[in-house]
Amino acid sequence: MDDSSDFRLGDGPSSGISVTLTAGTLHAIRERVGKRGVSAYLEMAAQRQIERDNLDELLAEFEKVNGPADPRAVSGKRTRLTGSSTPEPGTAA
């Protein structure tokens, strides 16, 4: 497959690769999705990670231009969105 093709995230034909995971990680994935769901699970995980990386880059550029976000404003927005001013583990500030 030609890796230089211009496909959007999640689009295009599938291509097989070799991936190395720790035994514990692979076991946890298989517990969730079974043996036949591993590829789809990893595809979705990779897409989410790319989206997060893109968001981190966008936020860094925003802060470079506008300065850091006001922590009180962020807390207020978080409360409006989630009902809690305390960030959940694994979520961005």
Image: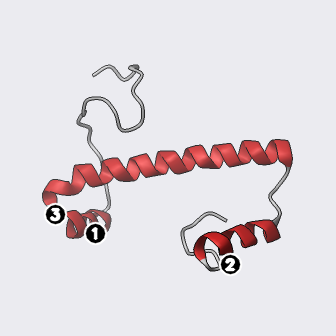
Q: Earlier in the sequence, mark 2 or mark 3?
A: 3
- Please give the count of numbered marks on the rendered protein: 3
Q: Nearer the viewer, residue 66 or 45?
A: 66
Q: Is residue 20 visible?
A: no
Ranked by sequence position, the earlier of labels 2 and 1 is 1
Mark 3 or 1, nearer chain start = 1
Residue drawn at x 61%, y 69% is: 81
Estimate the spatial distance between the alpha carbons at disc 2 and disc 1, rounded to whole Å: 31 Å
- Nearer-the-camera pick, 78 or 47: 78
Residue at numbered disc 2 = 85
Amino acid on which disc 1 is placed = Ala
User: Whole-percent x and y of residue 36?
Assistant: 14, 55
Give the structural element (helix, strand or loop) at label 1: helix
Q: Distance between the Cα atoms at labels 3 and 1?
A: 10 Å
| Relative to 62, 1 lies left or right | left
Q: Considering the image in quadrants, where does the N terminus appear?
A: top left
Label for residue 28? 1
Q: Are marks 3 and 1 in contact (CB under 8 Å)?
A: no
Report the Cα–Cα distance between label 2 and label 3: 37 Å
Specify the amino acid type for callout 3.
Gly
Q: Residues within 10 Å of mark 3 (few under 14, many from 20)?
A: few
- Residue 4 sits in quarter: top left
Residue at 57 percent across and 66 percent down: it is 91
Give the residue at mark 3: 34
- Could you tell me residue 51's position as x and y percent? 51, 47
Q: Which one is nearer the viewer's eye here, 80 or 61?
A: 80
Q: Secondary structure at mark 3?
A: loop
Residue 55 sits above or below residue 23 on the image: above
- Furthest toward the front, the residue is 80
**Residue 3 image offset from top left, x and y in percent:** 36, 23
